[in-house]
Amino acid sequence: GGMALAYEELKLHTTPEKFYIEACDSGANDVLAIDRVSTEVTLTGKKAVPQSAITRPIHGILGTIRLVAGNYLIIITKKKKIGDLLNHTIWKATEFDILSYKKTMLHLTDTQIQDNKSFLAMINHVLAVDGFYFSTSYDLTHTLQRLANTSPEFQEMSLLERADQRFVWNGHLLREFAAQPEIHRFAIPVIHGFIAVYSCCINGKYFDWILISRRSCFRAGVRYYVRGIDSEGHAANFVETEQIVHYNGSKASFVQTRGSIPFFWSQRPNLRYKPKPQINKTVNHLDGFQRHFDSQIISYGKQVILNLVNQKGSEKPLEQAFQKMVSSLGNGMVKYVAFDFHKECSRMRWDRLQTLVDKVSDLQDEFSYFLVDADGKVLLQQDGIFRSNCMDCLDRTNVVQSLLARRSLQAQLQRLGVLHAGQRIEEQAQFEKIYKNAWADNANACAKQYAGTGALKTDFTRTGKRTQWGLVMDGWNSLIRYYKNNFSDGFRQDAIDLFLGNYSVDEAEYASPLHVQTDWKFLALPIIMVVAFSMCIICLLMAGDTWTETLAYVLFWGSASIVTGAIILYNGKDFVDAPKLVQKEKMD
């Protein structure tokens, strides 16, 4: 697969003064030297590595970050082969190590040591979320269509220079490397999302089927703290999903996007199971809205919005506002389709989804897909895209995307001659199983990255049926989501902001943002509530001398627990774990 654009075989040599990263690919003589005191990064040769150095093999450099204790080097220590994409190996980074430049913590106060630990825990948290992928010889950040429409200058660039910045998750960590082109072969852009590669067979014809989801690092975050768009028009939870078929040298690709409803709204956690979404009343939405769609049109061409939110209840105002804004945008390149997923598919009537697919089938045929033959001649371009959203752009969105992608695949496999006329993918049991499971895995990865737990409704994606067990599992996942959204998401949001450089630790004027004095009521009220509730139960079990006495006790403790519970709920948003590092647009 062509010359590697970045070094693949690396060794890390550590001395008290320096980190040396040696390129071990055949014919390579480069060594990257990082000074642990001055933090300077230079290119040198193999002779520079001292004999006394401690050596270990590594699989890549994620980058460097500055925390309270100084600089840290983040390396990839384990990788797993996912498969080959057009003859290039795709790796998943599975384990990392964070190495301190400084050898002691003696220069820090106790508070600084605590904070440094918290920041390290944040970086470790982001690295522990599944879904970091890279290749040393292929540009994973671009779709096949973008790669086909490039200039000769583009081909000369390093992977880091030519990458689509939206999808490089270690862009901030590599910022020092970016400034020094001579060391770019040591810098590997890493994407966050999901990749599946399968070798499939239909009618005795072997082809590769690949699914890639690329998560945007602009306006990244956890679900209840990051909604809507920012002033630049970047949407929350924006993911580009590309499905690729590779058969006999021909390549076909179909691209879709998902992203939060693109105006200014929020849905802050407040201990209720579903916080009410709030649309910002004071800003000019159309400005950001227009920015969002201008950039989408530049990247993908025509837009068909599939808005899958409920058209009644708390989601209704969002549906109405979205529809209004598309009309006021008055752009012929942007079409709006609303489909009330929950209403249409209520009581497990998932066959109703076919009505949506049929409704947009003419548009899908018009947009087509990207197709290039074995000689590299482009036969078709995809000139429009489906931009799907629900509230979270997770569960409902993924189900609809998998159906549209299957319809495109049907056309591709027929055109390539894998499927005979009149044959349907649905009848190919073996492939259908691979297909459904990969899309369900994709849903899970996206959900873990945004909501912190697995996706819901994957039983439908996997089996084509909604099952009772699926409902039980959804209940369990919803419970974990509730807990995480209220009590650990502030930390998760801070972790992402630190990792992506939305918050930088400045050593010079360091004032700790992590120690916010908690008010007494945050401890007292929950304790009172638990005590009152327990007393209520005890009084019920250990009846007093008379039933009136028992009733009095039960009423007293019962009402005490209800009142404290109500106060806690009323002040819900003060009880949740809120982000401390970056003030996201305060919307309420």
Image (tube, grey):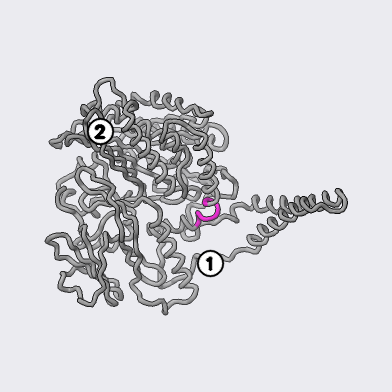
Give residue 71's position: percent from left, percent from top: 35, 69
Q: Is the magenta stretch mostly helix, strand or loop?
A: helix
- Alpha-carbon neighbours of circle 2 within 10 Å: few (<14), some, or many (≥20)? some
Q: Residue 231 carries which label?
A: none
Q: Does the magenta stretch include residue 369?
A: no
Name the foreground residue: 532 vs 538. Answer: 538
Marks 2, 1: nearer the viewer: 2
Residue drawn at 45 percent across, 68 percent down: 117
Amino acid at dot 2 = Cys
- Residue under numbered circle 1: 515
Give residue 544's position: percent from left, percent from top: 84, 53
Q: What element carries label 1?
A: loop
The answer, for residue 280, to whether it is visible in the render is no
Q: What element carries label 2?
A: strand
Q: In this view, does 177 lie above or below 357?
A: below
Q: In this view, does 14 lie to the left or right of 468?
A: left
Q: In this view, does 245 lie above or below 103?
A: above
- Residue under numbered circle 2: 201
Residue drawn at 21 percent across, 42 percent down: 86
User: Do the CB atoms of the residues marked 2 and 1 lie less than 8 Å apart?
Assistant: no
Question: Alpha-carbon distance for marks 2 and 1?
Answer: 58 Å
Bounds of the magenta segment = 484-490
Residue drawn at 42 percent across, 49 percent down: 449
User: Could you tell which of marks 2 and 1 lies nearer the N-terminus?
Assistant: 2
Amino acid at dot 1 = His
Name the foreground residue: 91 vs 45. Answer: 91
Give residue 198's position: percent from left, percent from top: 28, 40
Among the 4 quarters of the image, the one containing residue 275: top right
- Alpha-carbon neighbours of circle 1 within 10 Å: few (<14), some, or many (≥20)? few
Q: Which residue lies furthest to the top in this view?
A: 422
